[in-house]
Amino acid sequence: MSILAAAAAATKAVAFKGPHLDYHALAPEIVLTTTILLVLMADLVVPEDKKWVVANVASFGLLATIVPIVTLALSGGSHVRSMVGGSYVVDDFALVLKGLFIVVGYVVALMASRYVEEGDYYEGEFYFLLLCSILGMVVMASSRDLISIFVALETLSIPGYILAGWRKRDLKSNEASLKYYLLGVMASAVMLYGMSLIFGFTGSTLLTDIGAAINAPGPAGGHQAVVTMGILFIIVGFAFKVSAVPFHSWAPDTYEGAPTPVTAFLSVASKTGGFVALFELVYVGFFGRSDVWGPLFGILAVLTMTVGNLIALRQTNIVRMLAYSSIAQAGYILVPFAVAGTSPRAAQSALTASIVYLLVYAAMNLGAFSIVIAVARKTRSGEIASYGGLFEYAPGLAVLMTIFMFSLAGIPPLAGTWAKIFVFRAVLDAGTGWAVALGVVAAVNSVIALFYYSSVARQMWMTPVPDDDRTPVAVPAPLIAALGITVSVVVAIGIYPQAFARLGELARLT
Amino acid sequence: MVAQNIAFGLLAAAMVAAGFRLVTTKNVVRAALFLAIVLGGVAGIFTLLGAEFVAWVQVLVYIGAIVVLLLFGVMLTRAPIGKEGDLDNDQRWTAALVALFVLGALAAVLADAWGTQEIKFQGVQRTAAVSDSIFGTYVVPFEVASVLLLAALVGAVALARRD
Amino acid sequence: MLRNAWLIPLIPAVSFVLILAFGRRLPAKGAEIGIGAIGISFLLSLVAVVQWVGRSEPREAVERHLSWWKLGGVDIGAGIHVDGLTVMMLAVVTFISLLVQVYSTGYMEGDRRYTYFFAALSLFTASMLMLVVADNTLQLMVGWELVGMCSFMLIGHWWEEEANSSAAIKAFLTTRTGDVGLMLGVITLFFAAGQNFNIANLNRLALTGGISHGLLLTGGALLFLGVMGKSAQFPLHVWLPDAMAGPTPVSALIHAATMVVAGVYLVARVYGVFWAGFSIGDGGINLIALIGGITVIIAAALAFVQDDIKKVLAYSTISQLGYMVMALGVGAWTAGVFHLFTHAFFKALLFLGSGSLIHAVHSNNMSEMGGMRKRMPTTFWTFMVGSLALAGIPPLAGFWSKDEIINGASHGFTLFMVVGLLGAFMTAAYMTRAVYLVFFGEYRGHAHPHESPKSMAVPLQVLGVLSVLGGLVGTGLAGSKWRFSNWVRFDIPGAPEIVKEHAFNFPVATLSVAVGLIGIGIAAGYYLRNMFPRGAAEKSGLVRTGYKVLVNKYYLDNLYIDGVVRSIQYPIARAAYWVNQHVLDGAVNGVGIGARKTAQVVYDVVDQKVIDGAVNGAGFTAEEGGIVLRQTQTGRVQTYAAFLFGASALIAVGLVFFT
Amino acid sequence: MYLNQFLMLAAVLFAMGVYGVLARKNGVLVLMSIELMLNAVNINLVAFGAFNNTVAGQTFALFVIAIAAAEVGVGLAIILLIFRNRASVDIDEIDAMRG
Amino acid sequence: MLAAWPVLLEQPVLSVAVFLPIVGAVVLAAIPKGREDVLKAWALLVSLATAAVGVYLLGAFDYGDAGRLQFVVDTKWIPVINSRYHVGIDGISLPLLVLSMVITVLCVVYSWDHFPEPHNPKAFLILMLLLETGMNGTFAAEDLILFFVFFELVLLPMYFMIGVWGGPNRQYAAIKFFLYTLFGSALMILSFLALYFKGGQTFDIPLLIAQGGTIGHSTQVLIFAGLFMGFAIKVPMFPFHTWLPDAHTEAPTVGSVILAAVLLKLGAYGFIRIAIPILPDAAMTWAPWIGLLAVIGIIYGALGCLAQKDMKRLIAFSSVSHMGFVMLGIATLTTFGINAAVFGMVAHGLITGMLFFIAGSVQERFKTRELSRLGGLLLQAPRLGWVLGFCVFASLGLPGLAGFWGEFPAILASYQPAQGLQLWVFRTYMAVASVGTVFAAGYLLWMLQRVAFGTAKSEFEQSHIHDIHIPEYLAWTPLLLGIVALGVFPNLLFHVTDKAVTVVTSGVTQLASAR
């Protein structure tokens, strides 16, 4: 892409001096883009029956993308590489999350491979769009100004809209796509309006400038109101992305209708993308106005946890149940935001908490969805009831699902526990009465959540096999790999949380 | 200045009227045309604000591309060209309420914020300046946007394609 | 031997284990182990007695103890305290136990749980002996509870019938109710004595004013609650008659001679506390004496209306225990203990006698006996001896001890002296009645009674002899050294002498004997009237007068019946019995039933409905909330959009205008 | 010229867009309403750009226009897809999944 | 983590004791389902090996210095939140640790040839070993987070044990048990974190004990409240006990045994190990209320027992009553009381464990636990009957058996609670509690009468009832011996716990002396 920039520079007046670009820092994006193009090419040349090649190209591309991330991480010093006037920054925060996005993308690719193949959907385009979306996320992790954030957001969303409808002949899939699309666009409209207000007040799109302008003891009164409204609208835009109540309503329908791997992708990757944007905006841009977003996130968190859990109680479809569960989980991730404003230290431990939670959440949710895919291969059903007696004919899957479920519920010694403990820690670190109240609400919610998580376990272990069909479940190799990755993360982190905790601590936002 | 204000007045009136018809008309094709009017108005506003490049892009991309695209959409979904029964759903009043509420909130805040501040007019922005900023500060999003358009294209084709 | 008195309880304990382990495989099914062991213990006890008596006066109690457990710097010891009282008890317990075991070989022959029976007896003896030698209240309490359990096991020996097991449970629960008092008393005194369970120390402190009177009174009263349970004092006596459901040897050993006197023993042992606590020295009325007194009368009255011979004896036991408690209550320590000593012999004798009768006629009811005099001579004579001893006819054992009690009461406790005399009268009367119904008249049963085997007869004879001579230990005849009051005495080194000896008081003695005789006379006259020799009228005026009297027997009958017997037998006794069965007993059973009822209510309402309901309720509301919230998920995208914009605008307004 | 006259115009357009999005049931019309909202945003951006005398506003607007085009394309594709499967573009009939 | 290895190797004993079972479980998972004998043998081997470690600990433990933590390993674990892998045992944890080891072995032995339905010994044994790791870990942990992890680790296996192998109403019981406990621990973890921030940024229990006193009183009281919820539900104390009867009734025999013998102790242990020493001030404030709930529990549990028709449920309620004594002892905050509590825990573990074993065997033989249908056990299976009788007397606190030393000193202690506590309040508790002993005798003997005495009901007259099996002998003898041994020589336990308890109460005593 630099070529284009150079060309552009050449044609322009001498006055224009091309921006300095750190290609090492951009390496992940470049590798990924290259992969995207390769996939497109491959899709064109490879015959219909050899599409798995495309899948492999995509997977290897993703793995290849990890390399520059690692090298960046290892290149010494406090690896903060700021470009184009600080609108694009590659620091530990960015690296941790890029790594997460890439790995998640890889796991999703594994989950999807057989699914897409057997469902004879467009395979090449599928991976192409998947990678585009991941590119958007990777960019999001480094974006530090409104425009980049907006573009990154759309880049990670639009392929999502399309993928949600990938089962073209399935009405539910269409419906999922439409709902996701419409609400997504509207949310972006609201967000854009908010951005325009912020831009209007600060005269800059750069988050650091915005932060400075907002913190500056500027003209009081009306402008503060504008800022408030701007912040609110922007946050609403992303609250939609992370499916926070009351902006969650698309999630269950879309998750249920979309192809399961896509659901997994949306519920983990694009949700994380939204959170990443929120981190950047809140901790860099709007930090001075915690009086606005503090209570806002407080309300969102409480609503999200409670509503998500309560509705999840009533679900009979596993995917829908997981949808509401992931809403509730988003609630726990929002909790630290609410208390981040009380003190710099609180902000730090809040950020750590959220990031640790995201890392853990990715692992356990993807795992759960992998199981759903695997089981559906046999039962062809998404009903929780269809899991009856799974332990008898597929003990492996049952045990894994149990692990994921109870990890989501936060039962020691699984990774989920630590995610929650870090959230509680952030809350108590803030120490204010409201914070503690929030913590108690979260605690109570985590108990309510146990109802439905354990109900799945109950089905698998304690109820007889429906219509006594004990034919074993054939799990394809890629899926096994996906399960292997996820479960080992869940268990390993459960035993030695320090690993993720350290990542969460490294990922500071400056 | 006066001329500009008159121009603004006319444009604004036209746009609001067209916009209103757009969301109320019983005829889909007409709606598209009203949309064209609004968009044209927006282009006018841009010129008023000295953003000529953006204004032209607006004309080309929106009126030239998007409106046409939408018209195709109208055709392809075989919407009757003439009057059509009811294009609204049953939550019209809720919609109106919400819309007015939003308008009220926005108006109140904006009025409160920028009261009667003037835009100090510094003449037309050189297009070069725009391109400098695009290829300077915003080069990364620009490149990403290209990928995005590609993705949208491929995706749209994949979805819409009859197979 | 005094220093090694701990061996005496240990041996039966070991035998208990051995019997359980090998009993079944032995020729005599384990009886030999039991008897052998207890025999040894008995001999050792005798040695102990001799050694003790042989000691130079004033005799120092032997104290030995080792550390049992330590907590927070408090060292709780286990040990032995051997003095006159101890050795006396050791001898009695081992002796009676020995006889009873010998007797049981015959009585229990062919019983399904023969071996187990002997094991239980051994365990009981061990526990009882341990209670006796204990040098601290805690250890005493341990023994106390253990004997309670043994009594439970043995009362319920024939648990196939529910009645028996229920009786066992009733006995255990009633005594345990008392034991609550005991436990709290022990605890109170533990702290009162500066975190120390030791008894000697406790007595010393109590008598030297080392403990406040209030604490002593509380502690004493609490302890006495335990005593009332164990020694079947009014109103906690109700379990003892039911306890007769057990095999007769058990009744003889546990419910006459040994366990039931544990309460008395406890009072005697920690007498310092009671003396100071209830200020017995001041005379007048105090709780102990009062309870004792009431028990004497109530129980004796009840004995009149029993048909079950064992119940007669049971009530008589209760009333005799009342004597002992009363004695201790009026400061006649020696008398009380001495009565304990003698009573053990003749009451065991009576029970074993009744056992031999029951063995013969296969029934407890006197209405199915009668005329046993000829059929079972040994039993008859021994039983007669026992009865006379109980009735307090000189020179039998009972006379001396009972007389001492009344004599003691006469010093400042006139009321209780009267009670004592009245009791003596009634005792004599109801025993006569029992004897008549059993041995005289015609046989009314259906079995073919015959004299019991040697194994049963010999113990009877031995006890008979002792019932005759046992009392003499209390008299000068025993020699100054061996005199009971000389070697069994309550003296705490370093504490003032509190027990005063009262010289034998002839008027009192005559009075008590007279009362006894009258009792027998009236009863005998009433029951045995047709045995008066005929044709003696001519011989002398005196007899003629008597004859006249006897001719007008209806007049006499009426006199006795209406004047004396009925007035006792029917109104009072029946009333008392009714009260006993319905009020007290009912109360006890009622408590049981009531507890069950409340339990049911509490469980059903509070536990299942309220508490559990609260929990489930919480769950329910959560589910309800879920249902309601689901309604918001209409499935229509534009409704969602409305949420989106509406919510944003609302929150905006909220944040902007209200913060 | 006052800044606010532009902002108000934008606000009105935005509100109209909101109404259209909520009240119209023809999918295509909903898309049009969305465009209305996006244009409102653009007016804001350009106006603020002029007000703050920076080109960033225009740049932002350009990005919005470009991406709006992409969105409309995708949106139409989805609507066509649905039309093909159910021969209707009334989006208020699409409520198979709820609760 | 890697940095930890050298330290672990220096003093591996405790870590082995904790993690050997889970390693064994993993291996077990690898053994094919079909090879039942191998599975059992391996499970037995593992549990025995663990118990052997326990024996070694008993041998190597320095009793002269029982108040000091021994076999300590203290190394980095989660530096980010400054939580450490800190394990160690003192006189309080040692007996409980050994208890849980022994109980596990016995449970493996007991279930040797009768696994509950649905059979599947593999899963069952795996769960049992997981449980053991959880239990051992809890008793060894000296770091709040570590404690929390192990404390919760026991939940899942027990949940499945009840839910899969349990009785007809198992699912309800399982989830109830699970939710109750989790609710408690959710608040507990909040309190832990509060301690972390108020108590000097550490989760290390000894350090917190050293610094805990510095926390302000009102804060202490609040934190204590959270801890209280966590522990009281586990104990369980009235009114948080309702999960217990259901869980016990539905759980498979072995489950009930482990539940009663060890899991209930975790709560009380938490009070002794964490709540009281770290927050003595709050403990003083809370003690009367704990005591109140304790005595209510004693009476209430007894009443509950009298109302039962199901043998196992009755025993379950008796646990409520007995743990009441334990909590009363703790509430006095005196060395006497807390020693009594520890003793009570062990005794209750042995006795009630036995009772549940018997209940299980009875059900296995008669296929029912309804008291109204049972009877004459002594005739049909005399040995079983006598064992039952023995345990009944042990359980009603007969002196000379273990139960007595749990109850009596507790009552004794409440005559004179720690300085600063209301005398009359605790003396009232004392009186009520001692009445509870009568109730205990009541319901236990009543049960004995129903089950063992009398003659068999007609439905079972003909059925041949097998007397005690070999596995039962093997599983029970150690418990029965333990009951007698501890009953006769209470010092066996007291001399281990006493010093450690003095350490626990030191905070309180300091407060008292400060007053």
Image (cartoon, helix red, strand yellow):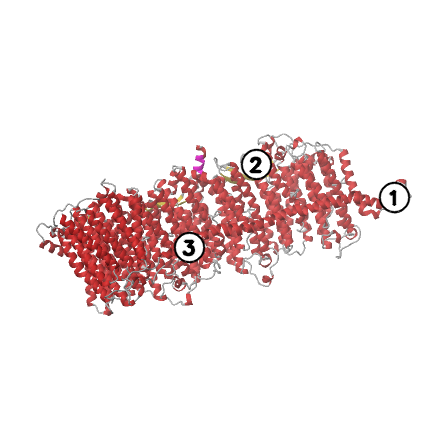
Amino acid carrying mark 3 in the image:
Glu
First to last magenta residue range = E505-511
Amino acid carrying mark 2 in the image:
Leu
Cα gap from disc 2 to disc 3, whole angstroms = 59 Å
User: Helix or strand or loop: what does disc 3 sit on?
Assistant: helix
Question: Upstream in the sequence, badge 2 or badge 3?
Answer: 2
Residue occupying the point 65% across, 49% down: C35
Amino acid carrying mark 1 in the image:
Tyr
Would you place residue A65 above or below residue C194 in this image?
below
Is A338 placed left or right of B52 in the picture? right
- Residue A68 placement (x, y as % from top left): 21, 54
Foreground: A176 or E416? A176
Residue named by callout 2: C189
- Residue A113 placement (x, y as % from top left): 28, 64
Residue named by callout 3: C624
Label 3: few (<14), some or many (≥20) within 10 Å?
Answer: some
User: Helix or strand or loop: what does disc 1 sit on?
Assistant: helix
Label 2: few (<14), some or many (≥20) within 10 Å?
Answer: many
Is C454 placed left or right of E306 in the picture? right
Residue named by callout 1: C547
In front: label 1 or label 3: 3
- Residue E160 placement (x, y as % from top left): 43, 57
Would you place residue A397 above or below residue E152 in this image?
below
Question: Can the viewer see residue E420 in this picture?
Answer: yes
Dominant secondary-structure state across the stretch colored magenta: helix
User: Helix or strand or loop: what does disc 2 sit on?
Assistant: helix
